[in-house]
Image (cartoon, helix red, strand yellow):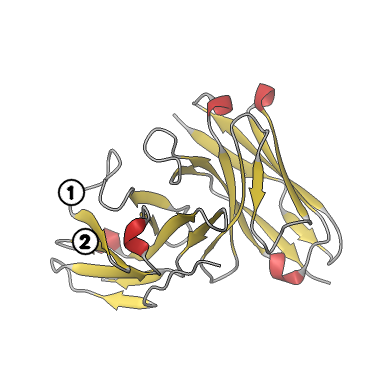
Amino acid sequence: QVHLVESGGGAVQPGRSLRLSCAGSGFTFSSYGMHWVRQAPGKGLEWVALIWADGNSKIFADAVKGRFTISRDNSKSTLFLEMNSLRVEDTATYFCARVGVDIDVNSIDMWGLGTKVTVSS
Amino acid sequence: SYELTQPLSVSVAVGQTASIPCEGYKLGTKNVHWYQQKAGQAPLLVIYRDKNRPSGIPERFSGSNSGNTATLTISGVQGVDEAAYYCQVWDGKTVHHVFGPGTTVTV
């Protein structure tokens, strides 16, 4: 069965850094591009970043560009999100999600349960 | 940046039909995907590429897309369909994925 499990969330002060991880299982992780999508409390979904299957290409939402980095270790089926210079408005549940390669590469066909990040002084 | 708009909420009685619009400039030229998110859960893809259902999604879910509006239709709504629904597109111009603000369906 396909699983995505995020970890690394927590409470952090503004300006600090945090690293999120997402472990994939039940599928060939190295064959799929992966997203990070976030959801602020009581708000809608916001796309954050995408990394291609081979890790060579990455794109970011304007709100996080220059502060967040997405990476992956295909040997360990793990996705990462390095978040620097965190702001209060980065407070959200962060979901890792799989590119729907098998149906439409611009869709998302699998989501993790998310990990909560709270940025507060 | 490309923007999608959705109504905040839609109310529907059990057994009736719910229509959830998603509007954007020349949206009909893009592929629209729809996600269902129940309270406290991760999103679930219910429609991809305008009108296609992934495996396991009930037939009562359907979609269309033309002009500036895509529509998710839930026919014969059931109580389990109460959730937030988000449309999503890929904007090749900005090289960004974009979500609509979401519509809460109340049954």
Q: Where is residue B22 in the image (x, y as percent from the top left)?
A: 35, 68
Quarter-of-image position of residue A79: top right
Which residue is tagged 2? B74
Question: The N terminus of chain B is located in which quarter?
Answer: bottom right
Chain letter behind tag 2:
B
Location of residue B37 with respect to A99 vertically, above or below: below
The verdict on a common chain for dots 1 and 2 is yes
Location of residue B101 with respect to A29 vertically, above or below: below
Q: Nearer the viewer, residue A83 or B28?
A: B28
Which residue is tagged 1? B59
Q: Position of residue A69 (x, y in %)?
A: 75, 47
- Which mark is first along the chain, 2 or 1? 1
Q: Where is residue A37 in the image (x, y as percent from the top left)?
A: 58, 54
Distance, label 1 to label 2, CA atoms, is: 9 Å
Q: Please give the name of the residue rendered at 68% of the width and 64% of the height, measured from the top-left corner.
A: A63
For the residue labelled by badge 2, is the local secondary structure a helix, a strand or a loop?
strand
Image side of residue B97 versus residue B64, left or right? right
Image side of residue B104 versus residue A44, left or right? left
Q: Position of residue A2 (x, y in %)?
A: 47, 32
Image side of residue A110 versus residue A79, left or right? left
Amino acid on which disc 2 is placed: Ile
Q: Please give the name of the residue rendered at 70% of the width and 41% of the height, measured from the top-left corner.
A: A80
Amino acid on which disc 1 is placed: Glu
For the residue labelled by badge 1, is the local secondary structure a helix, a strand or a loop?
loop
Question: The C terminus of chain B is located in which quarter?
Answer: bottom left
Location of residue B25 with respect to A81 vertically, above or below: below
Q: Which of B57 and B47 is in front in this view?
A: B47
